[in-house]
């Protein structure tokens, strides 16, 4: 399945990485997908398209993001939201009249699946601990990259792994965010889990042994 960019920015921009990611999701065929770190919603749209092909209308996508840069997350690694492409600047500023990194813009991109999608705006450190994980069977973790944030996100998703689900973490080998690798390695060791480093070291796939 081809990973489409929908005229927006995505962290999965390296050649083949988006397709690799979708193949990982396709193999597991999750029905309840949680993405932490939605950004412009490109991955969300690709996931919804894939799950729709597999399950028709019987799936759920939940996306959590700050959807803005503010003092609360000023130390976090957030992809640059500014477009270099002047056509994209014109498209969003004058045609769509949207900030692509906003709940409204992502909901617009996902409107085809509005009955299957729930977007949550806020800090994962505060929200995940109160989120019902009962049915979540796949987590794509690409939110805050600070050590404590990744650690908290993983700890709050432990029920997913305990029920034979999967946590796929992005940016395991990102040199500018060493806290990601540290948090993942500690989490896997402390909880006696299996961790497979895949896609040229980019992703860490965490599951039960």
Image (tube, grey):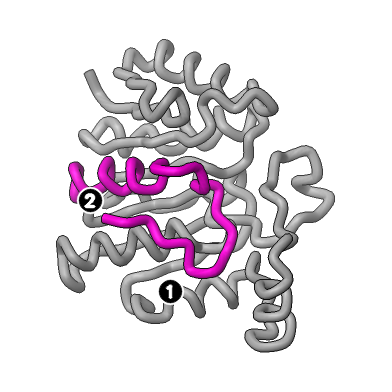
Tally of numbered tags: 2
Q: Which residues are magenta?
A: 1-29
Magenta span contains residue 176: no
Vertical arrangement, residue 82 with respect to residue 111, above or below: above
Quarter of the image where the N terminus is located: bottom left
Read off the residue under disc 1: 110
Vertical arrangement, residue 157 with respect to residue 95, above or below: above
Residue found at x 23% / y 50%: 30
Vertical arrangement, residue 133 with respect to residue 191, above or below: below
Is 144 displayed left or right of 59 in the figure? right
Residue 117 lies in quadrant: bottom left
Q: Residues within 10 Å of mark 2 (few under 14, many from 20)?
A: many
Q: Nearer the viewer, residue 186 or 200?
A: 200
Read off the residue under disc 2: 30
Residue 102 lies in quadrant: bottom right
Q: Residue 194's x, y, as percent?
A: 30, 18
Helix, strand or loop for disc 1 = loop
Is 21 displayed left or right of 201 in the figure? left
Quarter of the image where the C terminus is located: top left
Helix, strand or loop for disc 2 = loop
Q: Residue 126's x, y, as percent?
A: 61, 47
Is 111 displayed left or right of 26 in the figure? right
Magenta span contains residue 12: yes
Q: Residue 32's x, y, as percent?
A: 28, 55
The numbered mark, 1 or 2, whose residue comes first in the sequence reads 2
What whole-number distance in Å separates the C-alpha atoms at marks 1 and 2?
Answer: 18 Å
Residue 125 lies in quadrant: top right
Is 121 displayed left or right of 118 in the figure? right
Q: Nearer the observer, disc 1 or disc 2?
A: 1
């Amino acid at each position: 399945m081809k990973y489409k960019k929908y005229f927006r920015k995505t962290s999965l921009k390296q050649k083949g990485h988006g397709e690799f990611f979708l193949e990982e999701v396709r193999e597991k065929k999750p029905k309840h997908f949680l993405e932490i770190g939605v950004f412009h919603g490109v991955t969300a749209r690709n996931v919804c398209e894939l799950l729709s092909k597999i399950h028709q209308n019987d799936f759920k996508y939940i996306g959590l993001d700050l959807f803005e840069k503010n003092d609360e997350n000023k130390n976090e690694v957030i992809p640059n939201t500014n477009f270099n492409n002047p056509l994209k600047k014109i498209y969003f500023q004058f045609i769509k009249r949207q900030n692509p990194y906003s709940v409204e813009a992502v909901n617009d991109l996902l409107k085809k699946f509005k009955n299957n999608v729930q977007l949550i705006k806020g800090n994962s450190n505060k929200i995940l601990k109160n989120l019902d994980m009962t049915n979540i069977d796949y987590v794509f973790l690409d939110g805050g990259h600070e050590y404590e944030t990744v650690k908290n996100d993983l700890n709050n998703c432990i029920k997913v792994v305990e029920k034979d689900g999967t946590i796929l973490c992005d940016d395991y080998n990102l040199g500018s965010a060493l806290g990601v690798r540290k948090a993942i390695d500690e989490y896997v060791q402390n909880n006696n889990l299996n961790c497979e480093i895949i896609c040229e070291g980019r992703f860490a796939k965490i599951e039960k042994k």
